[in-house]
């Protein structure tokens, strides 16, 4: 009995194994793509933070202190 279905006289153990392997590969690929997207967003966010800090430092050099 594979996957809860029972057919008398017929067994397909290779089908269940193939579906398991296929599902595992698809999930692995999706996880890899999601991680790549997350890493790219993290790099962009880090760049934005660094540029913002640099802009703040350079702007503060041109601003006169209040009296």
Image (tube, rainbow, N blue to C red):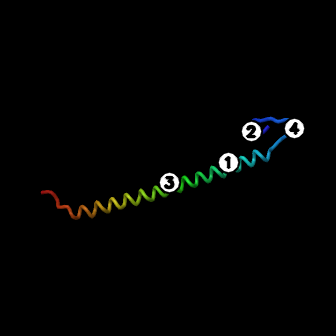
Please say if 12 is above or below 6: below
Residue at x 12% of width, y 57% of height: 67
- Percent x, y of residue 34: 54, 52
Q: Mark 1 and mark 2: span between their CA atoms? A: 14 Å
Position in image of residue 50 (x %, y %): 37, 61
Q: Determine the CA span between mark 1 and mark 3.
A: 22 Å
Instruction: Say the numbered circle drawn on residue 23.
Output: 1
Which quadrant would the N terminus be assigned to in this image?
Answer: top right
Calculate the distance from the C-alpha at mark 1 to the C-alpha at mark 4. Answer: 27 Å
Q: Which residue is mark 3?
A: 38
Q: Earlier in the sequence, mark 1 or mark 4?
A: 4
* Residue identifier under label 4: 9
Q: Which of disc 2 and disc 1 is earlier in sequence? A: 2
For residue 3, which numbered disc appears in the image?
A: 2
Q: Secondary structure at mark 1?
A: helix
- How would you rate the neighbour count of disc 1 (Cα within 10 Å): few for under 14, some for 14-19, many for 20 or more? few
Q: Quadrant of residue 63?
A: bottom left
Q: State the residue at coordinates (17%, 61%).
A: 64
């Amino acid at each position: 009995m594979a996957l809860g279905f029972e057919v008398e006289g017929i067994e397909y153990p290779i089908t269940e194994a193939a579906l398991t392997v296929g599902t595992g590969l698809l999930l692995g690929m999706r996880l890899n793509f999601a991680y790549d997207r997350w890493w790219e967003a993290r790099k962009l966010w880090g760049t934005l933070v660094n540029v913002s800090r640099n802009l703040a430092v350079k702007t503060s050099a041109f601003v006169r202190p209040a009296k």
